Image (cartoon, helix red, strand yellow):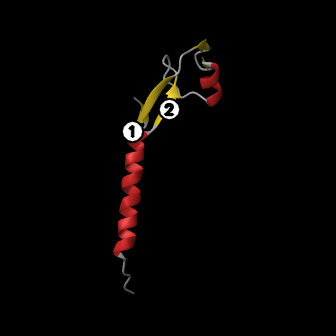
Amino acid sequence: MIRTVSTLDVHSTVEAARQSQQAMHRMHFDGCPHCGRALSIEEVIEHHCQNCEREITPMTLRYNNGRAA
């Protein structure tokens, strides 16, 4: 059995992979400046890190290759 692949299918797959990789470079989150842990929405609003048990000013951190940068 011979299976043909449309160039449109290949193009859409490549485009999806490209967009996914670009999104990885843009990922950021609010984190604790002391322990680097991602904060929940509640922690951001209350300016309190439950991990450190202290008042904090959330800072924007980038997610880079599986770790906070």
How far is disc 1 from disc 2 in space, using C-alphas?
A: 14 Å
- Residue 18 is situated, as x and y percent measured from the top left of the image, at 36, 54
User: Residue at image x 52%, y 28%?
Assistant: 30
41 in relation to 32, above or below: below
Amino acid at circle 1: Asn
The single residue placed furthest to the top in the displayed view is 54
Image quadrant occupied by the N terminus: bottom left
Would you identify the image quadrant in which residue 5 lies? bottom left
Mark 1 or mark 2, earlier in chain: 2
**Which residue carries the number 2 mark?**
29
11 in relation to 27, above or below: below
- Residue 54 is situated, as x and y percent measured from the top left of the image, at 60, 12
In the picture provided, is 44 more to the left or to the right than 59?
right
Q: Residues within 10 Å of mark 2 (few under 14, many from 20)?
A: some
User: Residue at image x 37%, y 60%?
Assistant: 15
Would you identify the image quadrant in which residue 63 lies? top left
**Which residue carries the number 1 mark?**
65
Q: Which mark is residue 52?
A: none
Image quadrant occupied by the C terminus: top left
Amino acid at circle 2: Phe
The single residue placed furthest to the front in the displayed view is 45
Q: Residues within 10 Å of mark 1 (few under 14, many from 20)?
A: few
- Residue 67 is situated, as x and y percent measured from the top left of the image, at 43, 33
